[in-house]
Image (cartoon, rainbow, N blue to C red):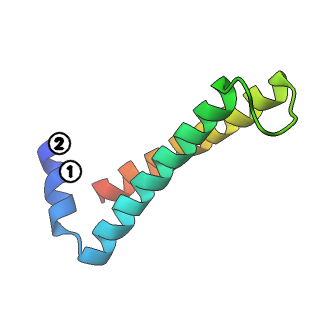
Amino acid sequence: MLDNILDNIKKKSLKERFLLVLGILFFLLYLVLGLFIIFMDNFPLDMSLPYRIAFGVILIAYASFRFFRIINDTNT
């Protein structure tokens, strides 16, 4: 299966590969931002802990949504 994914990536044009890398970069950005918001002790915005956790979970859920879209796009 991994060989199939790597072959599909190699068949993509330069523009498609750039967009794939950009998609992975933004996935990681949303994931890390969500984790920072949840676990950062001195958060610069004045938010209570339940709202920070909810916002962080929403960002992590959005990051996983983007990840599954990248995976599905890579398989086609």
Label 1: state its secondary structure.
helix
In the rendered structure, the answer to whether residue 12 lies left or right of residue 20 reads left
Which mark is on residue 2?
A: 2
Q: Amino acid at mark 2?
A: Leu
Q: Position of residue 62 (x, y in %)?
A: 60, 44
Determine if residue 61 is in view.
Answer: no
In this picture, residue 19 sits left or right of residue 54: left
Whether residue 15 is situated above or below residue 41 in the rendered picture: below
Q: Which mark is residue 5?
A: 1
Look at the numbered discs 2 and 1 and tell me whether their residues touch, using CB distance below 8 Å: yes
Quarter that holds the C terminus: bottom left
User: What amino acid is labelled 1 in the image?
Assistant: Ile
Examine the image and state in which quarter residue 52 appears: top right
Q: Nearer the viewer, residue 40 or 58?
A: 40
Tell me the distance, in whole angstroms, between the alpha carbons under discs 2 and 1.
Answer: 5 Å
- Which residue is rendered at x = 87% and y = 35% of the image? 46
**What percent of the width, then of the height, locates residue 41?**
70, 23
Image coordinates of residue 29 in percent, x first then y, are 52, 48
